[in-house]
Amino acid sequence: MLTKWIRVRIMVVAAGLGIFFLAIVVRLVDLKFVQGPTLQEKALREYQKDFPVLPVRGSIMDRNRTELAISTFVKSLAAHPRRLPDKKEISRKLAPLIGMTPAAVLEILERDRPFVWIKRHLTPQQAEAVEQYKAEYDKQLKAQRKKATDGDNPGLARPDAIYLIPEAKRYYPHRTLAGPLLGFCNADGHGAEGLERFFDEYIYGKPQKSLNIIDARGHIVFSKENELLDETIGDNLILTIDRTIQYIAEKELQQGVQKWNAAGGFALVVVPQTGEILAMAQMPPFDPNLFSKYTKDFYQNRNVTVAVEPGSTFKIFTVAAALDAKVVKPTDRYHCENGKYAIGNAGVIHDVHPYGSLTVAEVIKKSSNIGAAKIGLKLGPQKMNHYLKGFGFGQRTGITYAGENFGLVRNIMSSRSLIDRVTVSFGQGITTTPIQLAMALAAFANDGILMQPLLAKAIVNHQGQTVKEFHPTPVRQVVSPETARTMMALMKTVTETGGTGTEAVPPGYTVAGKTGTAQKVVGRAFSKSKYYSLFIGVTPAEHPVLAIVVIVDEPKGAIYGGTVAAPIFREIAGQTLRFLGYYPQPQTPSPTDTLQVKHSPAARPTPAPPAAKPTPGPPAQAAMVPDNSGPAPLKHMPDLKGKTIREVISILHNAGIRCQVEGRGLAYDQKPEPGAPLPANNQCLVKFKPQ
């Protein structure tokens, strides 16, 4: 019996152990294969966390790579509200440290969210005060946990419930300099206005996620964030703007606006041969560092987004169209009706001063509305409409900037009102943006070629490698080179004795320009007290270097462009020419040799003066499209090596081929190669280098 009982007990114990080990095996199988993936995922979530690595915006620089917009690292205060049991006390102590009210902080902390921003972009003083408070707060939590019997007491806050996060903040070191042009960024680092917005996809960089390993208290044990920093840095934007010229334009414009107690103003400085914008200024000023304190009227770049009536400045385009269409000559005479001209029953046109018979040249010099109206009538609506479109009015210029205004150009061909068709001739009933006006003006200084405005030179990454380049782009031949040269001569008389723009000439230089005064439209009628005063001009007149537009909004005490805007033009032009290395001769200048030119650095625009033989142009010189006359059309690509830019363009123009030019000097490479068939897309690339 004893032996039998022992056997029974052994069998029972063996069965029990078998069942036990079987249960263990079953549990292991369940944990490993059934619940394994789920449990592993939960475990990874506990100690592995994906933390966002915010991108660092690239810089915006001027043409000489001086930084105009940079990113600096600041700290932002964040919290996990669900981990904070004592929200009222924390709000009371945090609020004065970060410049907020306790109620505002409490409202944020009481949100039912796992994560909240308490305040973004703290000042260094605020960040230091928060760090001191957090150190004391963490010390108190540690002491409380030592006294608690349960370390996971839900009544205690966790040390990582409040913390500072480093972020990149946009900073504009020159404050208001080019503020409306640069724009600004929102709190998340995305471009919200201006160039910051237009080039955001390049500048913003690429957000990344860093896999961090944390301990039970939420402290980071291992992070790959530093390995990802290079990938998060955005590209840098290089502009055609010159910081010094921008400063000159803003300074002189501001002084002019203050002198005449005006509402504001605009100033543009352009290189006629390339379309490069050296300065784009407006008043009142705007500081993008404090963008939240300004309204849209301040931070919007109105040189591009706002259209104004050009007034009498528009007469030069009417006369240029009539000359190019060969319906008038500079010596043709028109009777200006002694200052009062009735257009049938449609209305009456007045001149500021009564004039009798004036030549076409004198119509420009004296700025006669009646003379311009009669020239416009002789030109006719169809040709007028053709040339208006040719100069780019009523259409976008293609500038790399968001929100460009089209301007307003009536269809004068279908207009039933004769007075509406006539007033366009002297700049009424039409609106144009300052950038449109500047590019149309620059065409006269570029042998009649309209250029696309060039605001960005290149995009480069943080390692200095070029991501994208922007080249000068000719749009079309608006008027012939002969017409353009004639207009330059006519516009020069405006700034000579007896003209309306004598105040625009810097001592020792020459200017070809035009004054203008335009009534502002208030509601649906012209205002009797609000005006735009304008002066647009090219300097030096004989071999142009700069095209400048100055517009003063609502001046008080005087309204005429020759009195208000011309002196601002004079100061901007004179200081800019000297900065670029173009100095007036001490003796009386002759018509053919006005300037003593000192070569400036390659980064500055230095258009070459005309000579008997074409000389190499500036870096990235735009293609000069010549007149249509010349040899027979080409059948194959010619050998262009060793030729100048002007010679290359002259040859290719006969085949209807548009040429993209790189560099300056003499041609050394071309695509397609010499002897190859003419390109199907009518475009080719020619590279130049100094001789």
Image (spheres, rainbow, N blue to C red):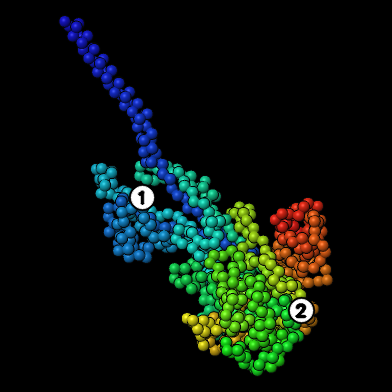
Image quarter (top left, top right, bottom left or bottom right) of the N terminus? top left
Image coords of residue 446 (percent x, y):
72, 71
Q: Residue at x 71, y 57 (%)?
A: 683
Q: Is residue 602 visible?
A: no
Judged left or right of residue 16, residue 630 is right
Q: Which residue is mark 1?
A: 160
Q: Nearer the viewer, mark 2 or mark 1?
A: 2
Q: Earlier in the sequence, mark 2 or mark 1?
A: 1
Task: For the residues labelled 2 and 1, say whether their Cβ atoms are less than 8 Å apart.
Answer: no
Q: Residue at x 66, y 74 (%)?
A: 387
Element class at badge 2: loop
Image coords of residue 371 (percent x, y):
67, 87
- The residue sitting at the left extreme is 1
Q: Residue at x 78, y 72 (%)?
A: 610
**Number of residues whose C-alpha sits closer than 10 Å to that of mark 2, classed few (under 14), some (14–19) or many (20 or more):** many
Q: Which residue is mark 2?
A: 594
